[in-house]
Amino acid sequence: MKKNIIFLLLISTILFAQDKNSTFRQTQFYGGFQAGMINGVGFNFNFLTSNFAEDFPFSAKLSFGVSYLDAGNPYDARRIFINDNTNGTPEKSGKTYGFGLDFLYRSSFLGLKRNYFYAGPRYVMFVGNFNYVGGNEDFDVTSNQWGIGIGSENYFRIMPSLDLVLNFGFDYYLSQILYGHDTAYSPDGQDINPRDGYSFSDADKAINQPQYQIKALLGFSYNLN
């Protein structure tokens, strides 16, 4: 008899605890992919979770993205970072690797049932390559920048576990040190091996490290639960 009572008490305790913590059991996880314009052609992968803390009104999303963009002016880049030579046919390419953490707040903006406004920090790594075919020069200019982003996402149900997602956003980045060859130009004037007559302002004009990113993306979000 005592064993039965203990067993019933144990079951009651477990059921009570499950009911008490039911909000945590409703935590949702989503994986997503988006593609479109991020200062050029780009795409990102993201992981979103909601209802992960009781009474917390925001969802949280981690994202990683790559975009391809114009690296800058190859003739100015060569003069500012290496030398005044003009031989060779210039080729250039640029890309950014971006990371973001957003907090999303649901709103019925314009009558959209699943609209979310978001904001959060950003970190982007810029790489611009300049190659002078026949000129014996091939070098990268790089920078790492912190920023902040805002935007809006809208979700439209396709099937029970899959949503179509529209994402419109704007990211702003702080200017940081530009590294190229054996030279670096810093916003605070603490340059390394600068070429005579050139400063960070000249390097920043020649190189397209992102100052902002306008985003217009289309993608999908899948419920992982």
Image (tube, rainbow, N blue to C red):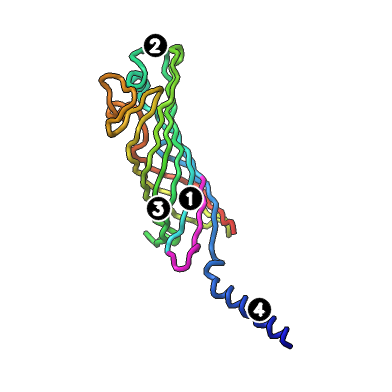
Please rate how many residues cluster around mark 4, counting C-alpha atoms within 10 Å: few if below 14, some from 14 to 19, many from 20. Answer: few
Q: CA distance from mark 4 to mark 3?
A: 45 Å
Badge number at residue 87: 2
Q: Secondary structure at mark 2?
A: loop
Give the residue number, with chain letter if any, for mark 3.
152
Frontmost of labels 4 and 3 is 4
Q: Earlier in the sequence, mark 2 or mark 3?
A: 2
Badge number at residue 62: 1
Q: Earlier in the sequence, mark 4 or mark 1?
A: 4
Badge number at residue 11: 4
Percent x, y of residue 16:
58, 78
Which residue occupies 27% across, 29% down?
201
Q: CA distance from mark 3 to mark 1?
A: 15 Å
Please rate how many residues cluster around mark 2, counting C-alpha atoms within 10 Å: few if below 14, some from 14 to 19, many from 20. Answer: few
Frontmost of labels 2 and 3 is 2
Percent x, y of residue 129:
44, 25
Please rate how many residues cluster around mark 3, counting C-alpha atoms within 10 Å: few if below 14, some from 14 to 19, many from 20. Answer: some
Q: Quadrant of the N terminus?
A: bottom right
Q: Is residue 134 left or right of residue 31?
A: left
Amino acid type shown at disc 3: Ser
Quick check: 164 above or below 17? Answer: above
Q: Secondary structure at mark 1?
A: strand
Q: Secondary structure at mark 4?
A: helix
Amino acid type shown at disc 1: Leu
Q: CA distance from mark 4 to mark 1?
A: 38 Å
